């Protein structure tokens, strides 16, 4: 298994349980590890044989801009399942953080790991 990584991706979404968090989008920071079998891509040198990270970033911008999540855990799980189901990842680690929402704290967040069910 090989890993594609996307670090420090900033996305806008509505996340939180408080009314102000539900009303206005906020920036979250996300880092991804996306496990896949890229042996074929290593030989073919063809983007169709791997997971296109630009497509992943575009899809996440589109999806998260249109959604609200109460919890960071749900947001992370949603992203993990999207990567597995739509992009064919076999394993993912998703780190997602809210920025500057607490005094004296730069970031708060969660890290989850998920694998494909097949």
Image: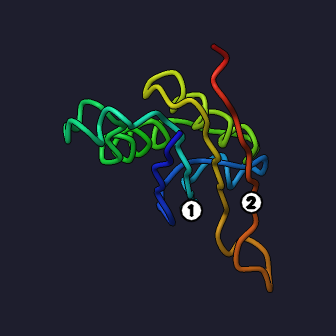
Mark 2 surroundings within 10 Å by alpha-carbon count, few (fewer than 14), some (14 through 19), many (20 or more): some
Q: Quadrant of residue 103?
A: bottom right
**Which numbered dot is residue 109?**
2
Q: In the image, 72: left or right of 33? A: right
* Colour approach in the figure: rainbow
Identify the residue under disc 1.
29
Q: Give the mark, 2 or 1, whose residue is nearer the N terminus.
A: 1
In the image, residue 89 above or below residue 75: above
Residue 89 in percent (x, y) is at 51, 31
Q: Which residue lies furthest to the bottom in this view?
A: 104
Q: Which residue is drawn at 20% across and 42% down?
A: 45
> Where, by quadrant of the figure, is residue 20 drawn?
bottom right
Q: Where in the figure is residue 83, as x and y percent of width and height?
A: 51, 33
Q: Which residue lies furthest to the front in this view?
A: 43
Q: Does residue 84 sit above or below 67 in this rendering? A: above
Residue situated in front as seen by the camera: 116 or 57: 116
Q: Pick the residue in front: 62 or 117.
A: 117
Q: Contact (CB < 8 A) between labels 2 and 1? A: yes
- Tell me the residue at 68%/35% (across/down): 77
Q: Label 2, label 1: how many angstroms apart (C-alpha)?
A: 9 Å
Callout 1: 10 Å neighbours few (<14), some, many (20+)? some
**Vertical comparison of 34 with 96: above or below:** above
Specify the quadrant that holds the C terminus.
top right
Q: Residue at x 78, y 75 (%)?
A: 102
Front-most of residues 19 and 66? 66
Secondary structure found at label 1: strand
Can you give x and y, in whole percent of width and height, for residue 110 in the image? 76, 54
* Left or right relative to 80: residue 65: left
Q: Tag count in the figure? A: 2
């Amino acid at each position: 298994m090989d890993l594609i990584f996307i670090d420090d991706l900033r996305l806008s979404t509505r996340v939180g349980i408080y009314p102000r968090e539900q009303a206005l989008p906020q920036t979250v920071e996300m880092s991804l590890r996306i496990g896949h079998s890229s042996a074929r891509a290593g030989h073919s040198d063809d983007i169709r044989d791997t997971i296109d990270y630009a497509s992943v970033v575009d899809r996440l911008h589109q999806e998260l801009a249109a959604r609200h999540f109460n919890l960071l855990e749900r947001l992370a799980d949603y992203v993990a399942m999207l990567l597995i189901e739509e992009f064919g990842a076999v394993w993912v680690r998703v780190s997602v953080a809210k920025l500057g929402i607490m005094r004296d704290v730069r970031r708060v967040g969660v890290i989850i790991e998920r694998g494909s069910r097949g």
